[in-house]
Amino acid sequence: MPFISPWTALLLLDELIVAWIIVRMLIRPRDPRTMLAWILALVLLPYLGLLLYLAFGEPRRRWHHRRRRRRRRRLGRCASRLLQDRLHGAASPGEPAAWLDNMMRLARRLTDFPATRGNEVVLYHEPEPVFTALQQGIESAARSIHLEYYIFQPDETGRMIRDLLIGRARAGVECRLLLDYIGCWRLGRSFVRPMLEAGVKVAFALPMIPLRGRWRVNYRNHRKIVVIDGLTGFTGSKNIGDEYRGRLEKYGPWRDTHMRITGPAVLHLQDVFAEDWHYTTGERLLSERYFPEPRADGRHVVQIVPSGPDQDAPIMHQMLFAAVGAARTELEIITPYFVPDATMVLALQSAAYRGVRVRLMIPARTDHRVVLWAGRGYYADLCRAGVEIFEHDRIMLHSKVMIVDREWAMVGSANMDERSFRTNFELSTLLYSRALAEELHADFETLKAGARPVRLRDAIRHPPLEGILMGLARLASPVL
């Protein structure tokens, strides 16, 4: 019997596993670009391609996503009855324009969350006002504090929020903190232990537990939610950490778009938190204690839109595509990570061709350089269609905002990339308010004053090395 070296045996094993994975891809078709990118990685990068696929390439409908959907349906039936009792007429936004009503119905059909009227919304663009308002909200809590974050750093800012929670827990307030397992990998036991000892309940979403089948890092909980006493909510794009206050020199000034909401929409934020908490811990938070009668004396119509890979449809992709198609005169987008798929590029081009003024604001200062290169690979196609692109290199721009016709807007945690479209658990808020849309438009103009416009000649001409990097990054864009 001929001798087979260990290296040859490992190579044969890699080839067999790769062949099996490719067959599975063909049996369970996905986006062709994503399939092709993974097949190239698996074939051209022995071992490394396999490791990357095992970590990031899991198909959408795995067993734990099916289990999450079953749990959500069971929890949802109870939650919907409770919400109906609480919302009364607050879920009827009146008589919106027909095109706006279409967006409301689309979001409701995808998420089961109706638009609610009677909300008050305060927008924040600078970091310190956000943390001041959050601190005041936590300190004022009388019954419950629920926080859900993708990143919670063990630095000065993280310690400040932690100590506030410890203080309220010792005062008898129920405190729960839900964190993403990968996003908060830096949190050690010494940081968490004081919270647990004080009575704060801390849980980590989507942990890597190989023996239980949860060993992929691909699906992350990217949501940012705070709910105080079931009456006041905070959501948007801001995490907890010194960098999000502009205190780290390597990032410089940091800018997010965050908001404080009071009114019926907070019950939907609470519902999203309750579902995520139940899936992670098994604890049910369905009682009037957590869903009190809302104040409905505000002036804004708001709709909460959660999305994630456990859904039957790619909700965030659907909503962004519909919003671009709904624009009649003007569309403004701020996104830190711009890696659109072919469908979204076509939608943006079509909007520009039919006379909509489409403007994109993208940061040139970024913590993910490969994503910037991938996004730049689409600039030429968009510029040819008349899309205006601006790059901002003076601040770390982390906002995720879409403003449509200066009449309504979408603000949340979702980027314009494949991860937000299909693999992350995200949360966006639709603001059907001309006043809020105008405020967000004014912020866009402020950013534009410090940004550099990208001309078509800039998008076409670049150094050869940068062109190669852009091409490689764009090739990998389906899996970024």
Image (cartoon, helix red, strand yellow):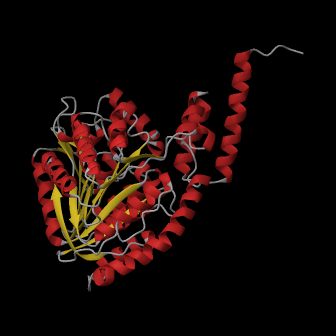
Relative to 337, does residue 444 appear above or below in the rendering? below
The reply to whether residue 62 is visible in this rendering is: no
Relative placement, left or right, of 156 versus 50 is left
For image coordinates 20% across by 31% down, the residue present is 248
The reply to whether residue 212 is visible in this rendering is: yes
Residue that extends furthest to the front in the rendered view of this protein: 171
Quadrant placement of the C terminus: top left
Give 167 or 366, whichever is nearer the viewer.
Answer: 167
Residue 197: image location, x then y, percent: 36, 41
Give 174 or 333, whichever is nearer the viewer.
Answer: 174
Residue 416: image location, x then y, percent: 35, 52
Give 178 or 312, whichever is nearer the viewer.
Answer: 178
Relative to 464, does residue 130 appear above or below in the rendering? below
For image coordinates 18% across by 48% down, the residue present is 131
Circle count: 0
Quadrant placement of the N terminus: top right
Residue 292: image location, x then y, percent: 30, 72
For image coordinates 17% across by 59% down, the residue present is 123
Place residue 194 in its image quadrant: top left
Relative to 40, does residue 447 appear above or below in the rendering? below
Relative placement, left or right, of 416 versus 219 is left
Residue 304: image location, x then y, percent: 33, 66
Relative placement, left or right, of 199 versus 42 is left
Give 311 or 183, whichever is nearer the viewer.
Answer: 183
Relative to 293, does residue 442 appear above or below in the rendering? above
